[in-house]
Image: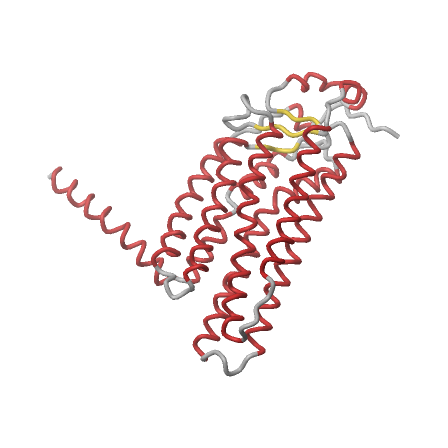
Amino acid sequence: METRYEHIYILDNIEIDYLFETSIFTVFISFVVNIFGLNMLINHSKRDNTSYRYCLIVSQITAFIPQCYWGICQCTIALFPFPGFISQGILASYVSTMILFFTWFGLFTIHALSFIYVLIIRLKIVEAFITKKSSNYTLYITLVSILLGFCWIFIIYFIFNNVASVEYISSHFPNYIHLLQVKGIFIVTDEILLRYSICIVVFTIFSTICFYIYLCYKIIGNVKSQQNKMSRSQKNHQKKVLYESIIQSCIKCVTCGSCGTWWVLLFIFAPIGNVNMFTLIVHCIFVGAPIPGTIVMLYQHPTYFKKDLKKVSVPIIQQSSIQNYLRT
């Protein structure tokens, strides 16, 4: 039996108040926090392997760029139960929402590869202490690349095979046929294609998490299995670095997965009431996804963070003192 929707709150109030403004503010906070995080990785992590440190820096940068792009250029929200998405960023009036998403996914793919590669290098470092025979790292990268490539192929198929049907909108959403002319909106009228898309999102997230858990398990097993190859300080350092990265990664997974999870919930429960506030909150969490993990990283190294704060605060204090002196 087909469902016919007469009134949906989010469609009657399609421009969520302060969505773009809160996105800009969140991006600014994320930029400031990431500057401190990058400074710590560049100047205070010299004990780590050079390749590992470079990968951490790349991962930190590539975590910020796609979310910054999403918050400023794209600013996309789902309109479920209406089968569509709308973008309210600065490029929404000039570029289609699906192309914007396509670009964001390209940026996020780079971060996903660097995210996994950080663990692979950590595994390689641990195994170097134990045995000359190393794991097949090329196989790991190939598996991740195939998974992400599969998502790319599906997205391309999605773009070229979706056609917004006027008949579908007029029969299911008779009061919102005008949305077909709204700039920045992308409508999916193929229900099967939309369901497959949701399944692909869930499968990709689940597969990535499983692969990440496997790498963590292998690193922990390698550290525990040897007794004499590492010194006690080396062993403790490897454990400390791994546990810290796991905590940071878990937090990033939760924040990065917030938007996708919310969209899946909207798709399943199809609310017609006011969920704009929840949408705004989830959107800000997603845009600011790098913030919690970076704050935890700074908290795990308070000595370095305090040094960086002193470097920033001392010039500010000196400048204010000079200004007060000139006024008097």
Picture coordinates of residue 163, whole percent (x, y)? 73, 24
Q: Name which residue lies at 83% across and 28% down.
A: 3
Q: Nearer the viewer, residue 216 or 288?
A: 216
Q: Which image quadrant for residue 304?
A: bottom left
Q: Quadrant of residue 165?
A: top right
Camera-side residue of 158 and 243: 158
Q: Which quadrant: the C terminus?
A: top left
Give the farthest residue toward the right. Answer: 1
Relative placement, left or right, of 200 versus 120 is: right
The colour style of the image is secondary structure
Q: Is residue 263 left or right of residue 231?
A: right
The residue lying at 58 percent from left, 78 percent from top is 225
Taking 202 as reference, is 121 above or below it? Answer: below
Q: Where residue 191 sits in the image (x, y, percent)?
A: 78, 32
Q: Is residue 268 above or below residue 99?
A: below
Please name the residue shown 47% across and 44% down the image: 64
Q: Residue furthest bottom?
A: 228
Quadrant, the N terminus: top right
Depth order, front residue of 8/176: 176
Across and down, in percent, residue 55 comes to 46, 55
Q: How many marks?
A: 0
**49 left or right of 170?**
left
Q: Position of residue 316 (x, y in %)?
A: 24, 46
